[in-house]
Amino acid sequence: MRENSVALDLDDAGLARGLPRPLHRHDAIQDVPFRPVGFRDDDLPSALERSARWLREVQEWLGEPVDVIGVHLDYDDSPEGVYYEVKLLCNDEDLAGAPIAVRAQEAVDPDAGE
């Protein structure tokens, strides 16, 4: 059995440089295992729509469905808080672009998947 390594192009947070990022100023990819990707808004449908749009963009970029193990809805009712937060718990390897790197390596070295 051969040990295969795949080179990943990651930023300082361990995310693929090509990974589409949430665009709204209240949305973010957080730094924990099975990273929560948060979408915050005072309007729940807007937060949900942005999360769905981001999932479609990442799926297109990744070339396969994103591994999401959970969806969490939270709220902040403090006077200065944004009320709703939708969090998608996403696989670190997907957000790092590992499936893309594996496919690229297999295209260069077809025996790499064995």
Image (cartoon, rainbow, N blue to C red):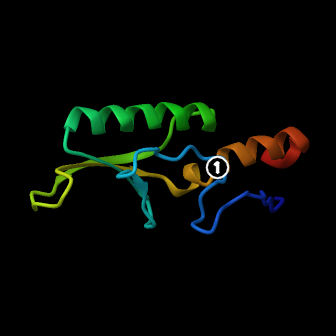
Residue at the spot 62% in from the left edge and 69% down from the top edge? 12
**Foreground residue, 11 or 46?**
46
Residue 13 visible here: yes
Which of the 4 quarters of the picture holds residue 52? Answer: top left
Residue 112 image offset from top left, x and y in percent: 83, 48
Neighbour tally class for label 1: few under 14, some 14-19, many 20 plus, Cα within 10 Å = many
Residue 114 visible here: no
**Foreground residue, 87 or 42?**
42
Which residue bears the numbered disc 1? 97
Residue 44 image offset from top left, x and y in percent: 20, 38
Looking at the image, residue 101 sits to the left or right of residue 56; the answer is right
Residue at the spot 73% in from the left edge and 57% down from the top edge? 9
Looking at the image, residue 76 sits to the left or right of residue 62; the answer is left
Q: Secondary structure at mark 1?
A: loop
**Foreground residue, 44 or 66?**
44
Residue 64 image offset from top left, x and y in percent: 58, 33
Which of the 4 quarters of the picture holds residue 104? Answer: top right
Q: Is residue 4 above or below residue 47?
A: below
Identify the amino acid type marked 1. Gly
**Foreground residue, 110 or 57?**
57
Looking at the image, residue 65 sits to the left or right of residue 19; the answer is left
Q: Is residue 50 above or below residue 76?
A: above
Residue 27 image offset from top left, x and y in percent: 38, 51
Residue at the spot 52% in from the left edge and 57% down from the top edge? 92
Count of numbered marks: 1
Residue at the spot 82% in from the left edge and 46% down from the top edge? 105
